[in-house]
Image (cartoon, rainbow, N blue to C red):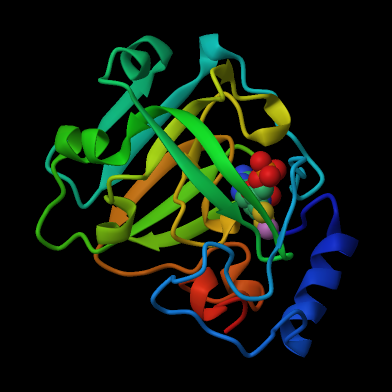
Amino acid sequence: MTEPPNGKLVAVKQAWARAGRLLTGQSDPDKSMRLPPGQRLVTNWPVLDLGVQPHVPLEGWSLKVDGAVANPVTLDWAAFMGLPQMEDVSDIHCVTQWSRYDNRWQGVATSVLLDLVKPLPSANHVILESHDGYTTNVRLDHFAEADCLLAHSHDGAPLTREHGGPVRLVIPRYYFWKSAKWIKHIHLSAVDKPGFWEVRGYHNVGDPWTEERYG
Ligand SMILES: Nc1nc2c(c(=O)[nH]1)N[C@H]1C(S)=C(S)[C@@H](COP(=O)(O)O)O[C@H]1N2
Ligand SMILES: [Mo]
């Protein structure tokens, strides 16, 4: 995506990144506190996007997983829902300072998907691409962790369109911008490829406990 619909919002966040806004200078690498430095707890669930919330009907939905894998797949809805399902409760930490505890997600573990496609030894990075043109990147070993999933439901109800339904990534160890909504393509790669916010001043990794907001 070259020009997102909400260019003004993007420009503001980019300016914040340049200015190092919201940084407290504190760090909690051992995760001794549940709430990472500089975060505040919310009980609502804010919606963040680039000004579009793509409508993706289940009939046309598909998820492509390819790149440095032995067995690339394109799953339709029935195939995706036919995979073993899991549930996990985790906290959300958004780089814009809100955190939300105890999100109960249901979906397919990233490890199940990886078992299916069989990553090649050269695969080290995962590039995620969404229906709104959004992209983001994570390390393969972190993507594969036990609390990471492709979620289709939250608290037992289908994920709403505004929160990334039909399916979004959930990767709790990072700021929430890494958890791509409306996911359509997962590309495994030997080389890293910074995504939408990563090329606009956000940190390439995004660990909330060491305040990797920008970088
Ligand atoms: N496809 C897509 N995924 C996305 C985004 C986006 O704009 N497009 N925003 C990211 C950001 S910055 C955040 S904080 C979370 C917000 O998720 P929520 O709206 O469900 O709270 O989604 C992330 N995933
Ligand atoms: Mo965000």
Image quadrant of residue 86?
top left
Image quadrant of residue 21?
bottom right
Image quadrant in which the N terminus is located: bottom right
Q: Which residue is drawn at 58% across and 51% down?
A: 92
Q: In this view, does 211 lie above or below 172?
A: below
For the residue pair 28 and 113, the one nearer the viewer reads as: 28
Task: Residue 1: tell me if it is visible.
Answer: no
Image quadrant in which the C terminus is located: bottom right
Find residue 20 and report its horizontal and vertical position in percent.
Answer: 73, 87
Find residue 47 and report its horizontal and vertical position in percent.
Answer: 76, 43
Q: Is residue 49 above or below residue 215?
A: above
| Image-based side of 115 in relation to 159, left or right | left
Find residue 203 and report its horizontal and vertical position in percent.
Answer: 55, 76
Question: In which quadrant of this rendering is ligand 2 seen?
Answer: bottom right
For the residue pair 58 and 39, the one nearer the viewer reads as: 39
Image quadrant of residue 200?
bottom right
Q: Residue at x 54, y 13 (%)?
A: 58
For the residue pair 81 and 92, the one nearer the viewer reads as: 92
| Image-based side of 188 in relation to 24, left or right | left
Q: Is residue 35 above or below residue 187?
A: below
Task: Residue 205: tell me if it is visible.
Answer: yes
Q: Among all residues in the image, which is located at the extreme right?
A: 8
Find residue 113 and report its horizontal and vertical position in percent.
Answer: 26, 35
Q: Which residue is drawn at 24% across and 65% down?
A: 190
Figure disc tally: 0
Q: Among all residues in the image, which is located at the extreme front?
A: 32
Q: Residue at x 50, y 80 (%)?
A: 210
| Image-based side of 100 in relation to 173, left or right | right
